[in-house]
Image (cartoon, rainbow, N blue to C red):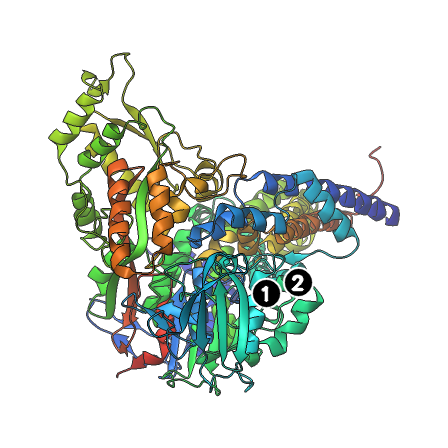
Amino acid sequence: MLNRPFREISNKLMKYNIYIGFICACAILLTSCSKPSDSTHSGTSRQIINIQNATSEQELKIGLSQYPSTLHPAIESMVAKYYALGMLSRPITSYDPDWNLVCNLCITLPTIENGQALLEKTPDGEDGIAVTFQLPEDAKWGDGQALTTADVLFAWQVGRNNQSGAINTELYRRTYALDVNNKHSFTLHINKVVYDYNHLGQFYPLPAHLEKAVFEENPYEYRHRTQYNAQPTNPGLWSGPYVLKEVAQGSYLRLEKNPYWYGKKPYFNEIELRAIENTAALEANLLSGTIDMIAGELGLTLDQALSFKKRHGDDYKVTFKPGLLYEHVEINLRNPILADKRVRQALMYALDRDLISQQLFSGMQPVANSSISPLGKNASNNIRTYPYNLSKANELLDQAGWNTFVDDVRVDAAGNSLRLEIMTTAGDKTRELVEQVMQNQLKKAGIDLRIKNESARVFFGQTTRERKFSGMAMFSWSMAPDNVPRTTLHSSEIPTQENNYAGQNYSGINIPELDTLIEQLEGELDARKRAPLWQAIQQIYVEELSVLPLYWRSNAYITPKWLKGLQPTGHLDPSTLRIEDWVRTE
Amino acid sequence: MSRFIAWRLLQGLLVLFIMSFVIYALIGLMPGDPIDLMISSDPNMTAADAARLRSLYGLDLPIYERYLNWISTALSGDLGYSRLFGQPVLQALFPALINSVMLLGLAFTISVCVAIPLGTLAASRPRSFLDYSVNLAAFAGISIPSFWLALMLIIIFAVFLGWLPAGGIAPQNANIIETLKYMILPATTLSVVSIGSHIRYVRAAMIEVLRQDYIRTAKAKGAKNTRIIWKHALRNAMIPVVTILALDFGYLFSGALVTETIYSWPGMGKLIFDSVMGNDFNLALVALLFATALTLTGNLLADICYAWLDPRIVIGQEPS
């Protein structure tokens, strides 16, 4: 009797043996299709088997969380694009991992001291500078054509043309002429005296022999018809250590060595850049061996990287590099409560940013004291700082008239509550967590902080741009090592309806002294005289607090232990600009 | 029949025209534009630069003017360029479409091939062990969130077992086995969810049909059970199921965003999402219109199938 149900089940299963057979056949096929594994990672309780045993030792697969929309050096500004370009082309100048300006595609960095930069008068009679660059004579494009000043001139003409839609606008705005001295030397004429005259930003020569005809046919349509989009695997487009071999749109880029590369030969024969937007999937791809490493510039978030390090720190090298991505709270100075400087300062004293850095980020994202990174040479140690001090915060709020409490919230003489609103990008776990911590910390000072988050698209597209946040907005700025904060602090950069909400001075800070300092700083050639100007700007910044600095964000580079030579930069110029130094050591 | 098809095609064109404006207006009304994205990654971009670029891209024009510009060039056969991919729209759309058809086509085929027999078998033995097992599996399939299932499959089959790639697409020179290996996990994820719902539809339709008088008559005449189920009942039960499958036909071409994102599969779902979020008007519009057109086509095919499945239905004729 007991066996009867089992027999019934067995009989029923037998009736469907065709299906069972089919499933078994699929399983066998699947197993036979899979390749035997050759590598295992130890150090965790489970064994992780690599599928990519076919990967050659001299092939490197890098995972990124973004796919570049174009690889044209002068069009669109995307981190993924610059990451790939670091291997495919070289800008004339860039910042190195120590944040010093260096030559990539020039022999010596022009300076006033070495005579390659000369003060001159512009055709309008204003003070300007002429800067002469010398290209390496053996520089070549990937099709063997010589890379000359004709390519530099063409790139400059593309950038200067208003119809081309080129980025790196600052360079084209301030250079009014480019003289070709010979095949390997050119002089740029700058229409004002600026101290960073030898920094050309993301300026890459373009192959005139391939692109000039397309551009001259229709400059407006050039950004669509360029061969960088139409035929990106043409080796003549690239002048870096690698050329593009294969493109799977939205999925991966495959690079191979450039036979005409004139510099140090890179170690890896092929490099694959695989775009995996979902960071959980990015991690799974790393563990499965589908990719070898995760780029720090576009990889896991810090909390994911910290968690990854705990779980797989024995198998992979996890490097945290604080950089120039600066997380802060923008204050809307039109808010009557926040218009009072004492309230803004009280907010800073009431926030325990050190605790946030230690508890949430294991100290990997250091506290920011101003908008100038302490890792750069322009940071000043002699400025006011705001260590956590609740009694000082209370004192300042009392002085500002918020000295009565109703239900633990401060109220002023008119009975208004000290209620503020903070906004950030919804779905960003880290920012949402920081908001909650801030809410709790400010509550202790009698400040009622309300959280109101929006999707990134609405937040950046409308709320911050049109200054529609009622109190505070939390996000980050990225910057270059020597970046003068004109776009974020100068009064001409306040977004208004009149200028169609263009400009990045979202807080609306408008201090004539600050404007003057920024203008003076831009034109001061003597580094010793710039130091006090940097100091003065930072001092105003921390006194006025139109922005509450929070912390410096870090990038997490997750690499295999056998990879050596990768130097995280922490700024906009990616680590791939030194791909020739990357080697496999096992 | 031909008059009916012509009429439906005309209706479809009208729907597409209205949809083109609705989609364009909705995307245009979303806050932000591509220049905002550029500003966030270029600290040196000034107010004047942003204004110049907005003017260059035509983003400073009112939405209706932008739409009129687009429709006039589209009607002349020029669908414009994709801002995100820097390529003509169809060139950007085509690889994603192929990827989606391959992946969702496989998932759809698996789903239909598994769901119709299982739903039919479950309906033919209601309240049996088989019926309960199939129902349990169906509910499990419907209830499992696809992102969770996808991650679990990656962890099991890619990370632990190392049998299959964790995501992406096969290299261009890959053979069919290699290509299929990249498709197994995403196709399984997609089909598990749809198998569950398809089983439920097939089962419900079959149970309804098996209660009909003509089935009883067929049994009374001594027809074999398998013949009754597979020949008489299933064909009639397919009419509501075809409606569901027709709607899924449109879905086949509009992609599956979550699954495509987790498996890094560059298909239509991801393309549409990225183009909408990246303010790529041309690409978003054409991709969404394409998906709309295919949904309409799917419904038209379903109407034609009704007549094939049930000879009593004469399409294009008013019910008497």
Chain name for mark 1: A
Q: From what the image shows, is residue A209 above or below residue A406? A: below
Q: Quadrant of residue A378?
A: bottom left
Chain name for mark 2: A
Q: From what the image shows, is residue B316 above or below residue B228? A: above
Estimate the x, y position of residue A246 in percent, counting from the top left: 53, 76
**Alpha carbon distance from label 2 to label 1:** 8 Å
Q: Which mark is residue A219?
A: 2
Say which amino acid is labelled 2.
Pro
Residue A90 visible to an observer of this rendering: no
Q: Which residue in the structure is indicated by mark 1?
A: A158
Label 2: state its secondary structure: loop
**Among numbered discs 2 and 1, the one appearing first in the sequence:** 1
Q: Nearer the viewer, residue A368 or A357?
A: A368
- Left or right of residue A342: residue B192: right
Question: Which residue is pictured at 74% across the width and 51% down the height?
Answer: B301
Q: Nearer the viewer, residue A112 or A398?
A: A112
Q: Work out which residue is located at the far right of the displayed protein and give it.
A: B3
> How many residues crowd mark 2 within 10 Å: few (<14), some (14–19), many (20+)?
some
> Which quadrant holds the C terminus of chain B?
top right
Say which amino acid is labelled 1.
Val
